[in-house]
Image (tube, rainbow, N blue to C red):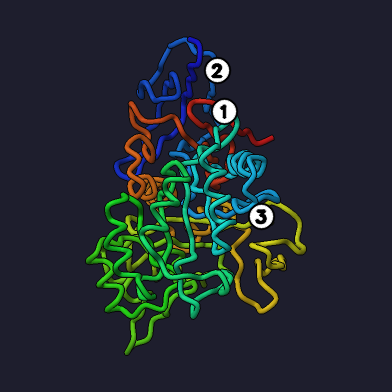
Amino acid sequence: MKDALLISHVTMINPEGRPFEGDIYIQDGEIAQIGRNFKMEAAQYIDGTAKDWLLLPGFIDMHIHGSAGHDTMDATQQSLHAIARSLVQEGVTSFLATTMTQSIGKIESALMNVAKFHRNVGEANLLGIHVEGPFVSKIRAGAQPVAYMISPTIEQFAHWQNISNYQIRQITMAPEIEGGFTFLEALMNFHVIPSIGHSDASIEEVQKAVALGVNQVTHLYNQMRPFHHRDPGVVGGALLDDKIKVELIVDFVHSHPQSVMLAYRMKGAKGIILITDAMRAKGLIYGEYDLGGQTVFVSEKGAHLANGALAGSILTMEQAVKNMKAVTNCSLQEIVAMSSTNAAEQLGLTKKGRIKEGFDADFVLLDRKLNVQKTICRGKVVFEKS
């Protein structure tokens, strides 16, 4: 059959239930049938016999700025395509192009650029935009340039949604800044994920934001008011509230392994979303790179500004998954939840994040050491390990 793919003798992993060893038939980019010993005709076959491969839903990275020398803020089609091509090598089949605090003009150029994007074969799905800043706290700036931080208004956001062709799916903001809570209240009409990040909010302010609809925290532990036994801060609020899912950068630079374990024990797999927060240096050699007009020094110790502040990561989702497994000894089902299903559910994607008939045929094939062997996007093999 034209455009059909048959994958046989693989172990399929979903976020719940037992692994299923069998075959999966894909047609027109969707999962048509799951079973055993299929004899259907297909344009392409993948036989996992004797390979002991695992088939997982494709990874979804909700927070990535760049890769392979390119960045969302470049505001060029070339950059978006280069990022989308590079991500499939690490098992990512879908992502949010993430902006950062910059001048209004530069942010708007990036938003309009995403609005024009059309995916090519061989690329990950660009699901939309994650706007990180400029509505954030100067006290918790990190690598976000303080000079461009502003108070939020719903009029500004509505304009951004319009020029982006309604591609904004997530916004990271600090609810405690001037106009923050008024903005959050109005934001609920836009069906966008509100995520607390780069925030100096108290736990009481976090609770107020949750009451208004906030259900996510951006890169837990990093650039937020930390936990103190008399002042639990954003970290305490995020860990204690089951309504909040937390982004987690598991590169052991942004978070100590035991901090990763703490998040896992407090939130469970259903409450964690693995992200990379990667910048343009991902996949390239160590050296000096640019992030929003700032020089970033990339080494084996991570990506840092001259003042020592972390400036994103060079983490891959493949390595994030391996690191999470190594620290927590979580199950494969939990890996699926943290690397795909939770993100899909947050984004309201009803056909991604699971291996199920009628769902999109977005997969990553892994060996038992969790190394990416193949990436399949909408039923097409877009990456094969050589």
At mark 1, the secondary structure is strand
Amino acid type of the residue that numbered disc 1 sits on in the rendered structure = Val
Which numbered disc covers residue 44? 2
Q: Camera-side residue: 331 or 190?
A: 190
What's the residue at 47%, 45% (across, down)? 163
Disc with the residue nearer the chain's start (3 vs 2): 2
Res 259 seen here: no
Locate residue 261 relative to residue 255 in the image: left or right.
left
Task: Answer yes or no: is residue 374 visible.
Answer: yes
Circle nearer the N terminus (1, 2): 2
- Picture quadrant of residue 26: top left
Please name the amino acid that badge 3 sits on: Arg
Q: Is residue 384 above or below residue 5?
A: below
Secondary structure beneath label 3: loop
Could you tell me which residue is drawn at 56 percent across and 74 percent down?
A: 146
- State the image coordinates of residue 215 (x, y, percent, origin top left): 31, 60
Residue at numbered disc 1: 381
Of the numbered discs 1 and 3, the one sitting upstream in the chain is: 3
**What separation in Å lies between label 1 and label 3 (alpha carbons)?**
25 Å
Label 2's element? strand
Kindly report the distance in space between the C-alpha atoms of the residues bearing marks 3 and 2. Answer: 34 Å
Residue 370: mark in rendering: none
